Image: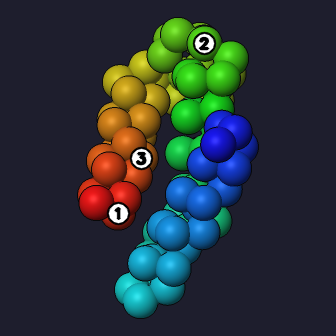
Amino acid sequence: MKNDDFINQYIALVKSIAGKYGSPGIPFDDIVQIEKDILKHFFEEKMPLAEIAKLLGLRRESVRQIKQKALRKIKINTK
Protein backbone atom coordinates (compact mmCIF):
# COMPACT_ATOMS: atom_id res chain seq x y z
CA MET A 1 0.00 0.00 0.00
CA LYS A 2 1.35 3.42 -0.91
CA ASN A 3 1.88 5.96 1.87
CA ASP A 4 -0.73 8.33 0.40
CA ASP A 5 -3.32 5.53 0.33
CA PHE A 6 -2.53 4.69 3.95
CA ILE A 7 -2.76 8.31 5.06
CA ASN A 8 -6.03 8.84 3.16
CA GLN A 9 -7.54 5.72 4.78
CA TYR A 10 -6.39 7.04 8.15
CA ILE A 11 -8.06 10.39 7.52
CA ALA A 12 -11.33 8.73 6.50
CA LEU A 13 -11.26 6.58 9.64
CA VAL A 14 -10.56 9.51 11.96
CA LYS A 15 -13.30 11.60 10.32
CA SER A 16 -15.83 8.80 10.75
CA ILE A 17 -14.98 8.47 14.44
CA ALA A 18 -14.95 12.23 15.01
CA GLY A 19 -18.34 12.60 13.33
CA LYS A 20 -19.84 11.07 16.47
CA TYR A 21 -18.48 13.84 18.70
CA GLY A 22 -18.70 17.62 18.77
CA SER A 23 -15.31 19.31 18.61
CA PRO A 24 -14.94 22.91 19.83
CA GLY A 25 -11.80 24.84 18.98
CA ILE A 26 -9.79 24.04 15.87
CA PRO A 27 -11.96 22.73 13.02
CA PHE A 28 -11.54 18.97 12.72
CA ASP A 29 -10.42 19.10 9.09
CA ASP A 30 -7.55 21.38 10.13
CA ILE A 31 -6.44 18.93 12.83
CA VAL A 32 -6.51 16.06 10.37
CA GLN A 33 -4.57 18.12 7.82
CA ILE A 34 -1.87 18.99 10.38
CA GLU A 35 -1.51 15.31 11.31
CA LYS A 36 -1.39 14.33 7.64
CA ASP A 37 1.26 16.97 6.89
CA ILE A 38 3.42 15.90 9.81
CA LEU A 39 3.20 12.19 8.95
CA LYS A 40 3.93 12.88 5.30
CA HIS A 41 6.96 15.11 6.05
CA PHE A 42 8.30 12.68 8.65
CA PHE A 43 7.85 9.37 6.83
CA GLU A 44 7.93 10.26 3.13
CA GLU A 45 10.33 13.19 3.07
CA LYS A 46 12.40 11.97 6.06
CA MET A 47 12.38 15.45 7.60
CA PRO A 48 13.49 15.81 11.23
CA LEU A 49 10.91 17.05 13.73
CA ALA A 50 12.70 20.39 14.19
CA GLU A 51 12.53 21.08 10.46
CA ILE A 52 8.83 20.13 10.30
CA ALA A 53 8.18 22.42 13.26
CA LYS A 54 9.88 25.35 11.55
CA LEU A 55 7.95 24.70 8.32
CA LEU A 56 4.56 24.57 10.10
CA GLY A 57 5.28 27.33 12.61
CA LEU A 58 5.01 25.01 15.62
CA ARG A 59 7.34 24.00 18.44
CA ARG A 60 9.31 20.78 17.93
CA GLU A 61 7.66 19.20 20.97
CA SER A 62 4.20 20.00 19.59
CA VAL A 63 5.09 18.30 16.32
CA ARG A 64 6.35 15.25 18.21
CA GLN A 65 3.15 15.05 20.25
CA ILE A 66 0.90 15.43 17.20
CA LYS A 67 2.87 12.72 15.37
CA GLN A 68 2.61 10.33 18.33
CA LYS A 69 -1.11 11.01 18.75
CA ALA A 70 -1.73 10.36 15.04
CA LEU A 71 0.23 7.11 15.19
CA ARG A 72 -1.72 5.99 18.28
CA LYS A 73 -4.98 6.63 16.44
CA ILE A 74 -3.78 4.49 13.56
CA LYS A 75 -2.64 1.69 15.85
CA ILE A 76 -5.83 1.65 17.95
CA ASN A 77 -8.13 1.66 14.95
CA THR A 78 -6.34 -1.00 12.93
CA LYS A 79 -6.59 -3.73 15.58
Amino acid at pointer 3: Ala
Q: Residue at x 45, y 77 (%)?
A: 18
Q: Residues within 10 Å of mark 3 (few under 14, many from 20)?
A: many
Mark 2 and mark 3: Cα distance apart in space: 17 Å
Quadrant where the image shows the C terminus: bottom left
Q: Residue at x 60, y 60 (%)?
A: 9
Is residue 62 visible in the rendered structure shown here? no
Amino acid at pointer 2: Met
| Pointer 2 residue | 47
| Pointer 1 residue | 77
* Along the line of sight, the residue nearer the viewer: 52 or 12: 12
Q: In which quarter of the image is residue 62?
A: top left
In the image, residue 47 above or below residue 15: above
Q: Position of residue 35 (x, y in %)?
A: 54, 45
User: Residue 34: which disc?
Assistant: none
- Mark 1 against mark 3, which lies toward the viewer? 1
Q: Position of residue 36 (x, y in %)?
A: 61, 45
7 to the left or right of 17: right
- Mark 1 against mark 2, which lies toward the viewer? 1
Q: Which residue lies furthest to the front in this view?
A: 1
> Sequence-wise, which precedes: disc 2 or disc 3?
2
Numbered disc 2: secondary structure: loop
Amino acid at pointer 1: Asn
Mark 2–mark 3 contact, CB under 8 Å?
no
Q: Residues within 10 Å of mark 2 (few under 14, many from 20)?
A: some
| Pointer 3 residue | 70
Q: Position of residue 2 (x, y in %)?
A: 69, 39
> Sequence-wise, which precedes: disc 1 or disc 3?
3
Q: Where is residue 15 in the image (x, y as percent from the top left)?
A: 54, 73
12 to the left or right of 24: right
